[in-house]
Amino acid sequence: MNKKIVFAITAFFIYLAPTPHCQSADGPPNVVLIFADDLGYGDLGCYGATKVQTPNIDALAADGRRFTDAHSVSAVCTPSRYALLTGQYPVRANDGRGVWGPAPITSKLIVDTDKTTIADVFKKAGYETGVIGKWHLGFGEGTNKWQEPLRPGPQDLGFDYYFGMPVVNSAPPYVYVENDRVVGSDSDDPLVLLGRNAKGITPITPIPPEAAQRSPNQFGGAKKAHALFNDYQVGTTLAKKSVEWISEHKDKPFFLYLATTNIHHPFTPAKQFQGTSGCGLYGDFIHELDWIVGEVMTCLEENGVADNTLVIFTSDNGGMFNLGGQAAFKAGHRQNGDLLGFKFGVWEGGHRVPMIVRWPGRVKTGTTSDQLIGNVDMLATFAALTGQKIGKAQQADSVNMLPAFVDEPEEQIRDHLVLAPHKGTHLSVRKGKWMYIPNQGSGGFGGKKPGDHTFAGPAAATFVGSVNSDIEDGKIKQDAPPAQLYDLEADVNETQNVHDENPEVVKELKALLAPYRRGIRQNSPKQGKQKRRTSGEVHYKPAKKTQAIPWRIIEGEFGHITADDFQFDGSGIRQNSKSKPSGLKGTSGEVHYLTTEGLPFSIRQDLGPTAASYRITVPRRARDQSRERLGHS
């Protein structure tokens, strides 16, 4: 590293040092970011859990700072990871169309390789960079056919090394990937995507029903690679790889992003953790997660770098009330504490997450912070940590929260935070004490009864005893306000919707949220000076005709197209010949929509000399895709 850079960074840490015993002479700190999967606000002892024991994570909190108002800016796994890596709200991704749901197994890499990532920040500062664990951001360009090398991928986003689960532990392929190769790959027996219910599928680890949902394998071949993957050894394998990587890079500044599969379903803890908790496999999986954290911390201590390592522990979204979560609830465990809602939804339980920061000598021990913070803030924070400046377009939505780590600011650093559930209709905004949701319900999963894998929303809220003024007997009241406003300072559990009592606040927050709902594109480096195609927010009428597949237009970019312009039926969508859409002169483009189940479709508008024609693009087998995506979330 350039000596001037080393001196500048060292001086920066001396300036930040809150106590005389800071070891600033050690140079820039190592950073370990542990990103748990589906860990709820109430899943840890230091956040109030009593049915599980998390001594290693609790020790982090005792030795550092625990945040009580930390959020994943998406309540969904893939867009949450997008935000973490890029410092950009996922609504901006995909050329302004956003990333809303879990990336399917054939997804290309959804992060633009020109976008600065948190790994890039550390790489530019001379760090060794590694990512171990769940990726779930896709590989390659176009449709990922799983042909090696799997590029572009993590190594094209600033990471020197990658090992882990390429998608999610509930979805195929059930193999490990190291860098850009399938571990155990064999050119004579390649990994082949065959599809659902195909013949010749390679067998995978058997698991019991109580482990919760896992999608069947869809791949053939790669028998050795599949044999190296055992669901019950994923957690211990990722811990081992993390310890090895840290030990190999202890002599240089390093950044490790450890994205655990714990505690995402299926719940498959190693044998040593089975039966150790008071709330079934769900709790046992938390115990394994705590052990993983303990292994990492022990490794830092044994290698003599613990005192010069910033450790950040958080989660990608709130807890999911699937079969494991329901069993844990019956045993007395509340995965999201008393917060309303679950994963995928925009109520607090879906995105308010644990967050703990430990940095000896810099972060005051045993403290808590009520600073509003999002995982999207890591990019700007790490840039400040390493003494770098990032351009406005690259930084996008990220705010430097380093002062909240090393100091105790009296004022809130963040002005507002945009929060996304699975459905774009419920993209919401938090400002100060206010949380504004521009629709009824949570915008998340739609399971209606206990036993449903996707049990959520009003029905699940009633089932667990949550109180909300809009809900009665598990349903939204007919006279409930059209949108939601909560005073989280007085009512963090969102029991009272005060929308109608505060029209001026609603007006202010609705205006604040409007640009994000349209899809702001000007901060995208590739967008340049291109102008947005619309100047106003568009609302669409629901389709009047009953259809087999429940399509619903929720957002677009042409000011006068309505659902009445198209006919809907079980086979897809077609133009309504009796209707002539207005307001289309002089423009060509593509309008993107979502079905009620969150699947995308688009309407392409091509203007000829005298008339406009339309090409409708609808996902094949919409129902199957929807079930698959819900199962893989």
Image: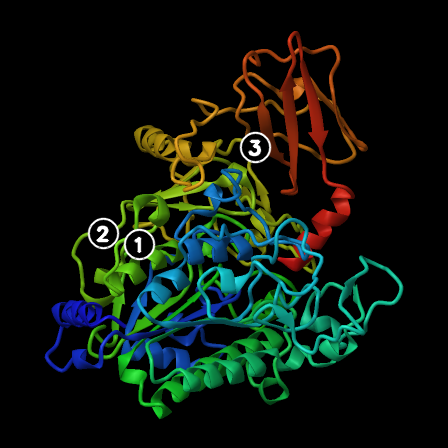
**Quarter of the image where one finds residue 55:** bottom left
* Mark toward the start of the polypeptide (3 vs 1): 1
Report the disc number at residue 478. 3
Between residues 177 and 504, which one lies in front from this camera angle?
177
- Disc 3 crowd, CA 10 A, few/some/many (<14, 14-19, 20+): few
| Residue bearing the label numbered 2 | 412
Nearer the observer, disc 3 or disc 1? 1
- Looking at the rendered structure, the kind of residue marked 3 is Gln
Q: Which quarter of the rendered picture does the N terminus lie within?
A: bottom left
Report the disc number at residue 372. 1
Q: Which quarter of the rendered picture does the C terminus lie within?
A: bottom right
Residue 10 appears anywhere in the view: yes
* Mark toward the start of the polypeptide (2 vs 3): 2
Distance from the alpha carbon under mark 2 to that under mark 3: 37 Å
Left or right: 233 in relation to 357 = right
At which x and y percent is residue 90? Answer: 47, 47
Q: Are marks 2 and 3 in contact (CB under 8 Å)?
A: no
At which x and y percent is residue 387? Answer: 23, 62
**Quarter of the image where one finds residue 543:** top right
- Disc 2 crowd, CA 10 A, few/some/many (<14, 14-19, 20+): few
